[in-house]
Amino acid sequence: MLEGRSQPKDFPAGMPEKPAMVGPRLRCDDGSELHVRDGHTAVMAILNLTPDSFSDGGLYLDPAIAVRRAEELVAEGADILDLGAESTRPGATPVSPDEQWTRLSAVLPGIFRARLKVVLSVDTRHVAVAAAAAAAGIGLLNLPFPQDLLEQGLLPKEVQALLRQFDGVVLMHSRGTPQTMSQQTQYDGDLCLSVAAELNRTASRLLGEDPALLRRAIFDPGLGFAKIAAQSLSLLGQTDRLRRLVGGPVLIGASRKSFLGRLGGRAAPGTLVPPAQRLVPSVTAAVLAALGGAAVVRVHDVAATRAALSVLSAVREAARE
C-alpha cells in the first residue's frame, strides 16, 4: 500500500518526494515479528565476528563468547542483531566469502538454539554469503556495498531471486570499495539530494519494479562511507528529508564512527577519542536520527541507546496528551 504525501518546500524541481512505502515485516528468531515503520525506531545491535573491525574487532572471535554477547544485546533491548564477518571500514583488508561463512557458521547454531526474540541480520557484500545466510534462516540482509551484487556474475533477475529470500534488505549508500571510498567524497551540489538519487538508482537496479520486493527495502545513507566528517553530520541532520526523498524506512548507523571522535569535548586537538569512549556522541546521534524519523538505528551500545530512546518516546507521548 502506498500513501501519498504533499511535496515539501525543500524539494527541488526534478527530485520529487516519493510516496511513502510501508516498511517490511521481519520475523524474529522466536517466531514473533518486527514491523519496520515510521513512528517507531528499532535498535539494531552490532556483533562483529572479525579481528579488525574498528571498534569491537577481536572481541567475539570465540563462538561461545559471541553467543553470550548476542544474548546480552537482546537482554539490553536489541530488536535486530546484525552479524558481520568482514570489516568494511576504510582501508579494511578483504575477506573471502568462504572465510566469512566459516566465522558465521561457527556462531549461528548457538544463536539459533537460544531462540532469541530478535531479528537476525547478516552484514555482507558477497552473493555467496548472502545465499548461505538465507538458506540458514537469517531474515534480514544488510548490504554495505549493494552495487557489488551486480558485479559478481549474477543477472538482475538472479539478484532479485536472492533478495526475495529475505524479509528485508538494507541498501546502504556507498561508493567504490573499502579501499577506495575515502577518495570518492566529492558530491555535486546538494549532498542529501545526491545521496538519495544514488540510493534510488541502486534500488531500481537491484529491486526492479516489483512492489513486493520494494517493500523489503530499508535505506541507509552510509555515514562515514565515501563521506568526510562534515558530510556525515549533514546527512544525520537531514534524516527526515532523506526519508522523504527515498520514500522508505531509513536506517542510521553513526555509532562510534570516526566523525564523532572529535566531538564530546574529550579529544585533544588533532586527535580522535578512541571508539569505546564515544558513547555520548553515539547515543546523541541515535536520538537525533530518531527525531528525524529513522526506523532503525544501528549501534554498539544497546542499553544506553534504548534508555535514551525511551525518554524521547515518553516526551512524545506526554506532548500528545
Image (spheres, rainbow, N blue to C red):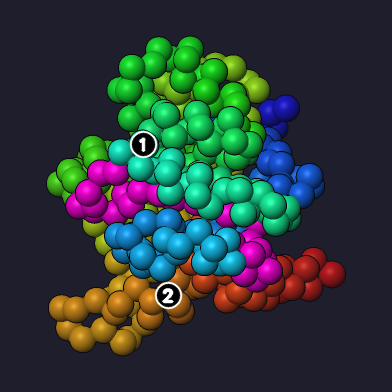
Count of numbered circles on the image = 2
Give me the residue at 24% from left, 52% from top.
Answer: 92
Magenta stretch, residue numbers: 70-95
* Label 2 residue SS: helix
* Residue kind at label 2, given as amino acid type: Pro
- For disc 2, the marked residue is 281
The label on residue 256 is: none
The quadrant the C terminus occupies is bottom right
- Find out whether residue 137 is within the magenta segment: no
Residue 134 appears at what percent x and percent y? 57, 32
Give me the residue at 50% from left, 49% from top.
Answer: 106
- The residues tagged by marks 1 and 2 sit, at their Cα atoms, a distance apart of 34 Å
Residue 257 appears at what percent x and percent y? 35, 64
Q: Nearer the viewer, residue 193 or 206?
A: 206
Asked if residue 285 shows in the view, the reply is no
Left or right: 35 in relation to 299:
right
The quadrant the N terminus occupies is top right
Left or right: 84 in relation to 210:
left
- For disc 1, the marked residue is 97
270 is higher (above) or lower (below) than 321: below
Residue 88 appears at what percent x and percent y? 31, 49
16 is higher (above) or lower (below) than 291: above
* Closer to the eye: label 1 or 2: 1
Q: Residues within 10 Å of mark 2 (few under 14, many from 20)?
A: many
